[in-house]
């Protein structure tokens, strides 16, 4: 089986969960001696030096079967690629590689036309798409947050989308939905990292029996010698469990603003010492308001007492995780959008650092509240501040949650699940977390889940 993995960005150029999962899967396929190729996009938000005159698809850093798709004409409004040469070069690439399976991990920077082109160029190939976010449903960066008040959105409709974008008519949103579903009809199947994602897309109109739930691939970096053979630190001996950390992208929807507010509340309510370490990048993609607040906190201008220490360690590679996890006790995942999977949960679980996560989307599905982590209502800074106090003062809490950490499935097992789906067999769905609050699904007038338009009904 010859497999082509198509990823949004390369994780060594721009960090992000979707591209990390795609790359881990590709490497796992190579280790399994499969004939796998990676095509990762690069656009003008990344290193411009990668762009060569006249080039569309190039090799990447001399690596075997790794290529870059140089995107410079993506239309975000209609999710289209406006560069006709890009389409022709992609078709030539497909005809040269002739994969049996074409597995897309995104269409951002590529364009929906590539789905239809792949179906036409290689009609016998199997096409699959992993649903890493909700951009197909939501024009607001796929976050499903109302643009005017940042509240969570549970369903998309022409009128509701028009409310978020008043300069765009409801009719245009109907056309957008038709165009997206027309392109998605090219796929033989879809892969959802969580059941939450599957349910949302099924309610929107994708055929439920074509959506397979498979966990994102993630190597277990706790197997590195730098973690297994590390000497105990003085902080490990003290075991006050007052060391918290954030890992991920420094953008608004990841919820760091909620943590900053919670630290303010904690400082007023409690007297305990607390350290908070920030590990992440892509601050340039955040709003100006968030960037200003972030700089205030990491520079010490936030006005918090000295017993609360905040440190920003910058970006990190996956191989940096052992050293950074060794310094902390708890991993904060305070997202305020419908988090799809939360790759940082995998990072927390592999190092047995209990996560403290928003009770939302895929996070609420993966974290077993009071068993291997703690959940709080998304955006509730007061509840998070109280959790800080509980984590620091409650005897045995950290030990109980840490010992129940589920770890991460092996990349080889995730590869095997994908191969089953590619061959037309159902994957084994991972169990859902217990004691979670189910996320609401969009309902119709009769109280049943909405299925959207009938464009993608199974037949």
Image (tube, rainbow, N blue to C red):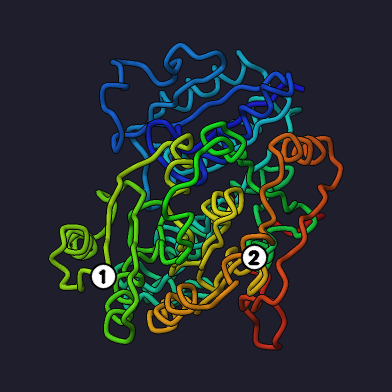
**Residue 325 point in image, percent of width and height:** 47, 48
Element class at badge 2: loop
Tag nearer the camera, 1 or 2:
1
Please state if 357 lies on the left or on the right of 29 as rendered: left
Characterize the local packing of mark 1: few (<14), some (14-19) or many (20 or more) Cα atoms within 10 angstroms: few
**Residue 430 point in image, percent of width and height:** 76, 56
Task: Report the residue at 64% width, 65% height from top.
Answer: 372
Q: CA distance from mark 1 to mark 2?
A: 28 Å
**Is the residue 41 above or below the residue 187 in the image?**
above
Task: Report the residue at 71% width, 67% height from top.
Answer: 433
Q: Is residue 433 visible?
A: yes
Looking at the rendered image, the quarter that the C terminus falls into is bottom right
- Report the number of discs: 2
Task: Report the residue at 41% width, 23% height from top.
Answer: 85
Closer to the N terminus: mark 1 or mark 2? Answer: 1
Q: Nearer the viewer, residue 218 or 454?
A: 218
Q: Nearer the viewer, residue 165 or 242?
A: 242
Element class at badge 1: loop
Q: Which quarter of the picture shows residue 168? A: bottom left
**Residue 34 point in image, percent of width and height:** 73, 21
Please state if 299 lies on the left or on the right of 342 as rendered: left
Residue indicated by mark 2: 372
Please state if 382 lies on the left or on the right of 31 as rendered: left
Q: Residue furthest right?
A: 425
**Residue 73 point in image, percent of width and height:** 34, 35
**Is the residue 196 above or below the residue 250 in the image?**
below
Characterize the local packing of mark 2: few (<14), some (14-19) or many (20 or more) Cα atoms within 10 angstroms: many
Q: Nearer the viewer, residue 264 or 108?
A: 264
Residue indicated by mark 1: 307
Looking at the rendered image, the quarter that the N terminus falls into is top right
């Amino acid at each position: 089986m010859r497999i082509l993995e198509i990823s949004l960005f390369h994780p060594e150029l721009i960090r992000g969960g979707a591209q990390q999962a795609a790359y881990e899967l590709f490497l796992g396929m190579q280790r399994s001696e499969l004939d796998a190729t990676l095509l990762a996009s690069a656009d003008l938000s990344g290193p411009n030096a990668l762009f060569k005159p006249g080039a569309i698809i190039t090799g990447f850093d001399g690596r075997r079967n790794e290529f870059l798709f140089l995107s410079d004409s993506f239309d975000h409004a209609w999710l289209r690629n406006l560069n006709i040469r890009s389409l022709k070069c992609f078709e030539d690439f497909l005809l040269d590689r002739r994969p049996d399976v074409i597995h897309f991990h995104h269409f951002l920077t590529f364009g929906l036309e590539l789905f239809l082109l792949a179906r036409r160029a290689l009609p016998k190939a199997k096409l699959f798409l992993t649903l890493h976010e909700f951009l197909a449903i939501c024009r607001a960066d796929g976050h499903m947050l109302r643009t005017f008040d940042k509240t969570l959105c549970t369903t998309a409709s022409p009128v509701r989308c028009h409310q978020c974008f008043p300069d765009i008519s409801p009719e245009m949103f109907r056309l957008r939905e038709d165009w997206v579903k027309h392109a998605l009809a090219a796929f033989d199947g879809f892969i959802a990292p969580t059941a939450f994602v599957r349910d949302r897309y099924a309610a929107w109109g994708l055929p439920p029996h074509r959506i397979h739930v498979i966990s994102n691939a993630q190597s277990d970096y706790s197997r590195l010698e730098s973690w297994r053979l590390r000497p105990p630190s003085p902080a490990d001996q003290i075991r006050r469990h007052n060391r918290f950390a954030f890992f991920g992208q420094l953008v608004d929807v990841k919820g760091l603003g909620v943590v900053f507010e919670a630290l303010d509340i904690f400082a007023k309510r409690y007297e305990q010492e607390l350290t908070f370490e920030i590990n992440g990048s892509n601050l340039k993609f955040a709003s100006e308001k968030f960037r200003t607040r972030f700089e205030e906190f990491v520079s010490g201008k936030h006005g918090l007492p000295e017993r609360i220490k905040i440190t920003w360690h910058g970006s990190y590679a996956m191989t940096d995780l052992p050293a950074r996890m060794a310094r902390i006790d708890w991993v904060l995942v305070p997202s305020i959008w419908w988090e799809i999977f939360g790759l940082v949960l995998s990072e927390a679980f592999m190092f047995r650092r209990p996560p403290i996560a928003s009770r939302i989307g895929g996070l609420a599905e993966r974290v077993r509240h009071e068993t291997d982590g703690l959940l709080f209502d998304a955006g509730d800074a007061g509840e998070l501040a109280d959790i800080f106090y509980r984590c620091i003062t409650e005897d045995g809490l950290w030990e109980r949650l840490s010992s129940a950490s589920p770890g991460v499935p092996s990349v080889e097992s995730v590869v095997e699940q994908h191969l089953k789906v590619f061959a037309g067999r159902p994957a084994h769905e991972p169990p859902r977390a217990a004691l979670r609050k189910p996320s609401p699904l969009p309902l119709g007038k009769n109280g049943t889940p909405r299925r959207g338009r009938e464009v993608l009904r199974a037949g």
